[in-house]
Image (cartoon, rainbow, N blue to C red):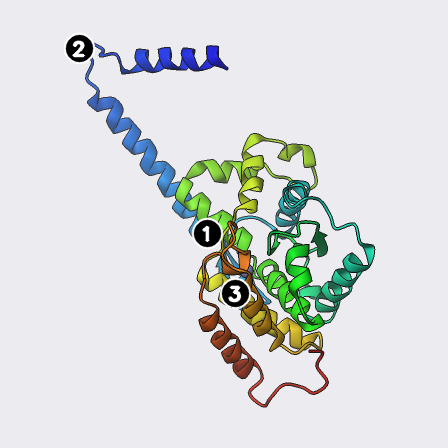
Amino acid sequence: MYRQSSSNRTSVRRRTAPRAGRPSGRNFGVRIIIGLVMAGFAIFSYVSSRQYNEVLGEEQYINISADQEIALGLQAVPQLIQEYGGLEPDPLAQGFVDEIGFRLVDNTAAGQTPYQFEFYLLADDQTVNAFALPGGQVFITTALYDRLETEGQLAGVLGHEIGHVIARHGAQRIAQQQLSEGLTGAVVMATVDPDNPSSMRTAEVAQVVSGFVTMKYGREDELQSDYLGVRLMVEAGYDPHALKGVMAILEAAGGGARQPEFFSTHPNPGNRIQEIDRAINELYPDGLPGGLTP
Ligand SMILES: [Zn+2]
C-alpha cells in the first residue's frame, strides 16, 4: 500500500515538472476535441436510447435491456442482504411477504412484464426501510414490517416498490449517470451480457451494483411509484388508502441515520398523502370497487 502511494506521488511530481520549450496548447486542444467527441457520443447514446414503456404508456431513455436489468439486480442481492443483517429467519413472516407480493404481481400489469419478482424480508430490526433493485428484487426490513398494522399497508409498501421496477427507474438512473459520466458507463454496460455472467465480473459493474445500495430516486419517481402502487393495490384487491397509513408510519419512524427509501428525496408525507388521494380520484373517478382488503 505504502509503496504504491509513494510511487504515485513520484509520478505526479514527474508529470507536473515543467517541460522546457514544449507548447502545451496543442495537447490542450487535442484533449478538448476528445472531450467533445466523448460528450457528443454520450449525448447521442442517451438520445438514441429511447424506449416505449407499455406499463406507463410513455417513452423513456434507457440503454439496457430488461434481461440486463434482471442480471444487474440479481448481482446486487447478496450485498444488500448482508448490509441489512441477513434474511429474517421466521419462515411464516417471509411467507406472508411472498403471499402479498405475488398477489400484487400475479393479478396486475406487473405480471405481464419480463421482470422476475422476488421478495425478501430482511432481519434488520433497526432500519425502517424498503427498496427494489432493477429487474424485480424487492426488500423490506423487519423494522418496517413490524410497524405495519394491516395487510393492505404491506401491499402498499410492496406495490410502491414494484412500481419502481416496472417504471424502470433504476435503469433510467443508469442512463442518466452515463450521460453525465460520458463514455465510461456506456462501455461498462456494453460488456454486460446477461447470458454470460462472467462478462459482468468487472470492477466497473461492481461499482454500478454498489450504486444501487445508495440509490436515491427523484421526487417524480417517488410520486410515479405511489401512483403505480395505488393502481396495483386496487387491481390486486387492496384498499389503496392503506398506502397513506404507510406514509404516516414512515413519518413517525423518521429521524434515523438512514432515511427510508420512501422519503429519500421527498420528505413531505403530508403532500404525498394528498397526491395519493389525487391518484385514487384520477384512476377511479366513479369510486373504488367494493370488498377491498384494508
Ligand atoms: Zn420509492
Q: Earlier in the sequence, mark 3 or mark 2?
A: 2
**Farthest residue in the bottom direction?**
286
- State the mark number for residue 48: 1
What distance separates the C-alpha of mark 1 from that of mark 2? 45 Å
Q: What amino acid type should be assigned to the residue bearing mark 1?
A: Ser
Q: Which residue is mark 2?
A: 21
Q: Amino acid at mark 3?
A: Glu
Left/right placement of residue 32 relative to residue 255 reads: left
Left or right position of 71 against 30: right
Q: Quadrant of ligand 1?
A: bottom right
Q: Secondary structure at mark 3?
A: helix
Residue sticking out furthest to the left: 21
Q: Which mark is residue 144?
A: none
Q: Residues within 10 Å of mark 3 (few under 14, many from 20)?
A: some
Mark 1 surroundings: few (<14), some (14-19) or many (≥20) residues within 10 A? few
Residue 116 placement (x, y as % from top left): 71, 55
Q: Nearer the viewer, residue 134 or 263?
A: 263
Q: Nearer the viewer, mark 3 or mark 2?
A: 3
Which residue is disc 3 drawn over?
Answer: 251
Of the pair 222 and 31, the residue shown nearer to us? 222
User: How far is mark 3 from mark 1, CA to CA?
Assistant: 40 Å
